[in-house]
Image (cartoon, rainbow, N blue to C red):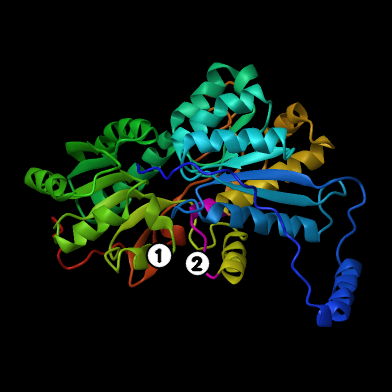
Amino acid sequence: MTRRPSRPIVPSLVVPSLVVPSLVIPSLVAIALATCLAPAFADGPPIRIGVIAEVQAIAGAATPGGAQIAADEINAKGGILGRRIEIVTYDNHSSSADSVRAFQRAVNEDKVSAVIASYISEVVLALEPWAARLKMPLITPGAASNEITKAIHADYDKNKYTFHGYLTSAAQAQLVCDAAKDLLTDNLKFKSVAIMSEDAAWTQPLDVGYEACLPKAGLDVVDHVRFSPDTTDFTPIFNNIEGKKPDAIVTGISHVGVQPTVQWKNQQVPIPMFGISAQALSPTFWNDTNGAADGVPSLAVATPDVAVTPKTKPFAQAFKAKFGTPPAYTGYTAYDDVYIIAEAIQRAGATDPDKLVAEMEKTDYEGTIGHIQFYGKDDPYTHGIKSGPGFVTGLVFQWQNQKQVTVWPQKIAEGKLKFPDFVKLSQ
């Protein structure tokens, strides 16, 4: 992955606007009215939640926005413990080193009570030891690597401050296989697939899961390609896979997405794609690929137009109203994470980190992505969110005519899986 030069981490704090002299009196009236209407926060300083995000990346840009909407809603209802929630945002430039510096500043200088950080597994794995050292609750809205929860399970007393607020790679693999069984094996009568994943921490356990569960879904794995996230020419990869004649390509991609999608379309690769394409979860992906996204599906946790829960669509509408575009997946999870933290603080009656961790472990919350609970101390995926029926089940959408159309599971599907004319479906 290309890294930008390191720059100072600057928290996103509110800066008072300059007031034009001729508008001083009206402005003072407006401020007075706002003060009368706004909830009073008299019991202490704001409760700060740090958000460390890849704000210049497709998948990370929605994280601060989702968190801010949750904070605004909570504050409009009187805050937590009589105190206002304040979101302090840090751009980590997709860098683990910058993320660590931001985490240290958030804890030591900005006095946050919890941190929401990153969709990149390598970043969260770098922050996990710091959460332990500084005893600071940390939750990720988008990283997937099993190693995050594995470390918590292996040394709970040390690493209990980290929570996994997104589906683990193992859970995602199983959900992809469940969807593949219904959509590819049963409906399209597919018999074989090739796995194509980027070489990253989150895809190592994902691919292990794919190798195990795809055959159980009735799909033979005829090829398995792992490529560098810095790859720019996917022609040799597509040519090699095409030579193996699979019925579909099952992907595990996040740091890339635009480039392979555009080349898949331009080269008229006759094999449909399936699996996970995290950049495709962004509402801008159609324009980012100049429409090459047509026919590209992906596992997701939510889409703007499907009521995964009663909270999904209202949040997506609020996000679009505030920022002009629907949220990427990290917007949904960051929104839920702020509520999880805030409710835990409310139950704990304080921001003490150990009390906060104990209450976060008791989370029983209906969020935008499903019913959220965390696996316990004795589970191999300690502090991971529970997946499966009754919890977070995920969905598969497909880009069709500029829209993310949910095609699985059937109970919330908006349409059926269909591919561009250049794709040849085996029957």
Residue placed at 41% from the left, 34% from the top?
170
**Residue 329, can we see it?**
yes
Q: Pointer 1: what residue?
A: 404
Q: Pointer 2: what residue?
A: 305
User: Magenta segment range?
Assistant: 324-331
Task: Look at the image and tell me in which quarter the N terminus lies.
Answer: top left
Farthest residue to the left: give it. 243
Count of marks placed on residues: 2
Q: Is residue 110 part of the magenta span, yes or no?
A: no
Residues at circles 2 and 1 in contact by the CB criterion of under 8 Å: yes
Q: CA distance from mark 2 to mark 1?
A: 8 Å
Residue 393, given in percent of the width and then of the height, sits at 48, 47
Horizontal relation, residue 388 to residue 351: left or right: left
Dominant secondary structure of the residues highlighted in magenta in the image: loop
**Residue 408, can we see it?**
no
- Kindly state the secondary structure of the residue where label 1 is placed: strand
Residue placed at 50% from the left, 29% from the top?
126
Residue 71, given in percent of the width and then of the height, sits at 71, 54
Nearest the viewer among 397 and 230 is 230
- Kindly state the secondary structure of the residue where label 2 is placed: loop
Task: Look at the image and tell me in which quarter the C terminus lies.
Answer: bottom left
